Amino acid sequence: MKLIVQKFGGSSVRDAARIQNVANIIADTYKAGNNVLVVLSAQGDTTDDLIAKAAEINPRASKREMDMLLSTGEQISIALCAMALEKMGLPVISLAAWQVGIYTTNTYSDARIRKINRERIQNELDKRKIVLVAGFQGINRRGDVTTLGRGGSDTSAVALAANFNADLCQIYTDVDGVYTTDPRIVPEAVKLPEITYDEMLELASQGAQVLHNRSVELAKKYHVNMEVVSSLERKSGTKVKEVVKMEKTTIAGVAKDTSVSQIALIGLQDNPGVAFRIFSDLSRAGINVDTIIQSIGREETKDISFTLSSKDVETALETLEKAKDTLDYDHIDVDNDVGKVSIVGAGIMTTPGVAAKMFEALYDANINIKRINTSEIRVSVIIDASEVDRAVKAVHAKFFGEE
Amino acid sequence: MKLIVQKFGGSSVRDAARIQNVANIIADTYKAGNNVLVVLSAQGDTTDDLIAKAAEINPRASKREMDMLLSTGEQISIALCAMALEKMGLPVISLAAWQVGIYTTNTYSDARIRKINRERIQNELDKRKIVLVAGFQGINRRGDVTTLGRGGSDTSAVALAANFNADLCQIYTDVDGVYTTDPRIVPEAVKLPEITYDEMLELASQGAQVLHNRSVELAKKYHVNMEVVSSLERKSGTKVKEVVKMEKTTIAGVAKDTSVSQIALIGLQDNPGVAFRIFSDLSRAGINVDTIIQSIGREETKDISFTLSSKDVETALETLEKAKDTLDYDHIDVDNDVGKVSIVGAGIMTTPGVAAKMFEALYDANINIKRINTSEIRVSVIIDASEVDRAVKAVHAKFFGEE
């Protein structure tokens, strides 16, 4: 008997009708002779509503109590979905993380899963019950509730799939798979039947919203077969796995990210170790820096500029200003009007001319490239924010054709 | 150092302002040098909202999943209240029932507390933390969530007070104590400074809404000093204890209950054991029968009539109709237009003339008594539903005076 893990996000369970729809999907999988282990997120706006309630009482509430509060959202989802399956006459049980024994690190609001007990879930599966587990949550060594941070429910699902050697881990969302680029910008975007973990990781970190990095990293580490599939339409999605056969194209997709900013430190004294100091300070503040450029400034000084996620700009500026005395720079420039366009594909570095093809597309479209950043399977360019959508269209057309 | 248990109901924590008010009460108690253990109910309409959500999906959901769903309400309350206390700079921790170890029987939706672990709460109190515990909930031997049924949070509070030998268990409500009768009907009603467990029990079961029977029974069993006190006004409430000094009057109060119905089985064959059969059937169906009258009917048959809570009428009729062949009655009459007025007081049976004084008041008011029922500390009369309020006024005036 196969074990299928299915994860449904907040919009997939936002009301009674959607929960019924989810129950139908689960029921079909179960009736086809599979064991089914389901992970659910909190309904629609529940988490936001709870955060608003907390903010009204104490905007600086402890993360421990926030986790205690927010974890109720997923518990409501699993109980309601269990009721829908009961109505269909199916054997089902809902379990919160503390009932399963999903043990995490102590870090409230951003915990990492350490260990999952097998006993309770396996007992229920052995009785041929459908098991619904609350996503996004765990407990720490003290027996306190933790939550897993962004992408938490996806991570719960993949961790459970890894732990129980599931045959498949399906991530149901309101899109029907991973596309070569955002179909809202480029109607010609094509759904990928499959994609590698690494490509998915690069796409996710370059702005594709389908799957969160953490879950893909975990899937890659434990060789979990993932599938991104629509909860609204019954059609095949995108499989995420170790190796895929890619015939027509060398890239998997084009991603964009408009929440990018550029910070430049102007007029740095040319002391050894300055660059190291800057980026270790930022790293300690939890900020990931993207592209870095160091250039010669005037009068024996130099400039260092880098890009980062726009949400981190404020913290970065605080960090840099705190260190002004040691860093010894003249002033800071911030540019929020930049964006990033990336191509991702397992074949990029082994296929000559792929990057050049991207640059050519941008050149033909008369788009100026400010910076370039590459990884083994990705080429990213930083351009004016206003040109991001046009760049995505041009690059996508170059690789996948106009229609 | 004293330990005070404080319980706040749903209306006391219904929004951010009320939660702040509750936090202020807790903070004052804590700052006065006491250890404070708090039990909270779900906010205002939360439980009803969750029940409505469930009903939309599956009106016959299992009680196990209902408990899983409903227990989130109290968890939200304790987390939010903890945040309010954190904002005031006080050390606080919220604990769900599974974190405390509040073990109950297996009966979902109406479980009884079996055992409460001392360790976690005592550890937190020893650190001088304010401990907030989710009321109304527990876990059973399987590690599943249970809820305690009606009056559940009061019961949680008293059970914790008993378990930790608390010096006082304060039940905060939106009334400021126990009155000689309902002040909405009789403006002359007087707040009782104190009342015995037994009197409180009779008042509660005769329709006074202040405290639930179960919590009072538990308090009596474990000699817990209880106090009913207002969460909105800072003034003394009513103390509930073993023995009180009552000087002026022999009764503690006048209670009414308008959700009473009368069922009559007409034309029963006079077989031995019929009455036993009727009431054991009803008892098995979970129905408490109040006054019973057996009378001679026509042609060697007899009639048996009894009063019961109106909410049980439907179940009672089903039970009786199922047993029609064995019971062998002619037909059933149902009368929903009856109500009950009771006087309650520890002195009733030892003070001659108390019952007579009540009957005299009703006679003077020209109210016809249909039935009478007494216990050691209570006299109840069944009268027309339309005359209940007038009866309460007349009886209250007789015992406590007009003004």
Image (tube, coloured by chain):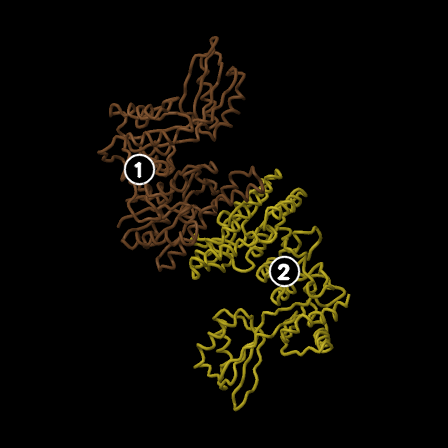
Chain colours: A yellow, B brown
Q: Amino acid at mark 2?
A: Val
Percent coordinates x, y for residue A327 in the rendering: 46, 81
Q: Quadrant of residue A190?
A: bottom right
Which callout, 1 or 2, points to the residue nearer the camera?
1
- In depth, the one of B304 and B37 nearer the eye is B304
- In depth, the one of A342 and B29 nearer the eye is B29
- Chain identity of mark 1: B
Labels 1 & 2 near each other (Cβ < 8 A): no
Percent coordinates x, y for residue B195 in the rendering: 28, 36
- In depth, the one of A367 and B289 nearer the eye is B289
Residue displayed at 70% across by 50% down: A234
- In depth, the one of A276 and B7 nearer the eye is B7
Q: Is residue B2 left or right of residue A317?
A: left
Image quadrant containing the C terminus of chain B: top left
Residue bearing mark 2: A210
Tag 2 secondary structure: loop
Percent coordinates x, y for residue A345 in the rendering: 68, 67
Q: Is residue B198 left or right of residue A185?
A: left
Up/down of A366 relative to B21, above or below: below
Residue bearing mark 1: B188
- Asked if both marks, 1 and 2, belong to the same chain, the answer given is no
Q: How far apart are the alpha carbons under marks 1 and 2?
A: 67 Å
Up/down of A364 relative to B299, above or below: below
Res A161 seen here: yes
Q: Residues within 10 Å of mark 2 (few under 14, many from 20)?
A: some
Percent coordinates x, y for residue A157 in the rendering: 58, 53
